[in-house]
Structures are given as C-alpha cells and as structure tokens.
Amino acid sequence: MNDQSTLIDPDLQDAKTVATRYLTALDAADPAGIETVMGALVTPGFTWHGYHPFERISDAAAVAREFWAPLKTSLTRIQRRQDVFFAGRNEIDGFESIWVVSMGHLMGLFDHPWLGIRPTRKLTMLRYCTFLRIEGDRVAEEAMYFDIPHLMIQAGQNPFPPQTGASLVQPGPLTHDGLLIDAQPKAEGEATLALINAMIADLGTWNLGLPLTEELARTWSDDMLWWGPAGIGATYTIERYAEQHSGPFRASFTDRAKTRHVARLAEGNYGGFFGWPNFTARPTGGFMGMPETGKSGEFRVIDIYRRDGDKLAENWIFIDILLFWKQQGVDILARATGIDA
C-alpha cells in the first residue's frame, strides 16, 4: 500500500526539465538570436501574457522582438537571480495542465534606455515571475509579470507618491528553500494548495464579517511577510499588513469582482496563481495617492506563497499597476518618461 505522504508526481519533474531548458536558453541568447531560440522551444500556438505596455502576444517571434531583444539590449550582462522554482498541476482546469513557476530578479547593467526609462549604467534588478504551461517537451503558454515601476524607482524616475509599504529589492524565502529542483511529496503540495484556497475563500468579496486582523490570522502567520509591488511596497506582520496595505486597499475600492484565475497550483511548501485579470474593482479615492475616477479597472496579479506548517508565511505579489492606471486615464509610464506608451 502506498504511503500518501511520500507519493510524488513524476510528470512534474519532466516539466521542470523542459522549463529549465527554456529559461537557460533565454538567458544565454543575445538580442539578435533570441527569436531563433524561442522558436525552437515553444509550441506553434504559443501565447505570452505580459505586463503593459506589452499585453498578450500570440507569436513567439513577436515576443522576442518586442520584449526580449529590447530588454537584453538595455540591461546588458543579464543574470537570472532565481529565488523560487516549482511545478504543479492546475486546479483551475481540473489538474489537467502542468505549469512551472520561476520567480526572482533579472539583474543587469542598465546601459541603454528601455521604455523611455533613462539608463543609469549601474546594476539594476527587474523583479519577475513567470508561469510556464508545458506540453510535451515545449512551452505552450507563458505568463510573465515584471515590476516596471520598481525598475523606474531604481533609475531615479519614481512615478508614484510615497507608498504605504516599503520599497526595496526583495529577497527570496526566509528559509532559502524555494528552488524545488527535486521531487516533492504530493501531500505537501496538496496542503499548500488547500491553505491558499482557504485564504481565497476568506478574502471573498471582503465580507467575512470579522475584524481584519482576525480574518488574516485564520490563514496567515503573525510574522507574515507581504512583498508587494512598487507603488504599494512591502510590509511585515499581520498588524502592519492590515494597517499599511490590506486595510487601506479595501477602503479605497468598491464593487470588487469575485476572484478568478487562469492557473492555481502548488508543490511542496510553495504555491501561487495568476489571473487575466484576477478581479476588477472601482476606486473610490485614496489608492496610491491618486484621486477616485469612478471607473472599474482590471487587476492582473501573480501571487506566490510560502507555507509554514498550517499558515501562510510569505507572499510575493506582482500587480500590473501601469495597466490599472492606464484604464483610469493616467498613463504612468508616459507621464514619467515623456514617451507615449
């Protein structure tokens, strides 16, 4: 009889091998050669979901030309500083598809302009997280989210008023165990996914009926770390998270739609999801120092979690803030750089 606590899913290991080959090839390619590299490693129907101003691109060659070649020309000598790496079956489609997640920073020398952002000739880090859907020995779909405003802040072009949280280059997991190269017991991933789902159920539409700190304590450890995007910032402990982000965020919006995701998965103590969008909400004033607009906007979000026992301990968040404000009639990128995005 199999011991459920030690069962593993060998298909996840195969998917990690494919994802590693893809990421390694992207890292090694120069701007002129990346189109060829991508073409050899993705399926014919490959689709890429990126942040504004890139949006969704259904052609690998276009992704290479429009995103990777300009980025690699601007940030020279790029290194991938990967902090989290795991695979899992997607709960959203009945655990049929397999996705691999990579999160960390792309580090390089900011030698040439990118998206109108002025180069510094200094070491610069671009926060990223990518979800890769694997089919056979190729990548069929990718959601790559990246914190452009954080790069702008490093370049001295901060487009936002003071944040409620702290802005900093974000470290990987406290436990330094986020690279799940080896197979993990299925039971551990199932426990992580169940906890993430419990948190989502509590979040709902902000109507659980408990004081905010009590609601959070149901699924979060007291010393939680919430690594938010530039424009909002990071915060530490349930009390300060409620004070510096969750409380102000809930007070700033109404008409929040129900959460929906494209992929939600977990392996070991790590899990996460992304949506396109995750939800919509209408600002009623005060969010990120901006006035209310009365317009509903999309929140395209990636969340990555680390579980510690029966509580969530760390959360890395990527939000397409540039897109949200563009939908509100404020082109943050153009305003900060003088170039129409």
Image (cartoon, helix red, strand yellow):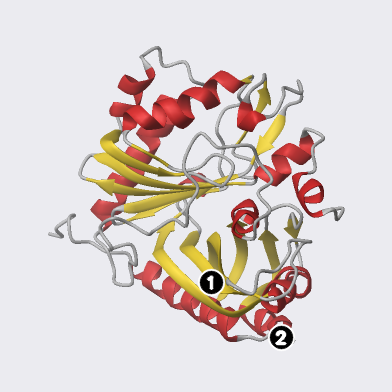
How far apart are the two marked residues, 1 and 2, measured between alpha carbons?
23 Å
The residue under the point 55% across, 37% down is 163
Label 2: how many Cα within 10 Å (few below 14, some 14–19, many 20+) = few
The numbered mark, 1 or 2, whose residue comes first in the sequence reads: 2
Q: Residue tagged by mark 2?
A: 36
Q: Nearer the viewer, residue 99 or 153?
A: 153
What SS does tag 1 mark? Answer: strand
Side of 45 relative to 125 (left or right):
right
What is the number of callouts on the image? 2
The residue under the point 53% across, 74% down is 136
- Name the amino acid, label 2: Thr
Label 1: how many Cα within 10 Å (few below 14, some 14–19, many 20+) = some
Side of 289 relative to 104 (left or right):
right
Image height of 85 relative to 72, above or below: above
The residue under the point 68% across, 53% down is 157
Residue 52 image point, x, y percent? 73, 52
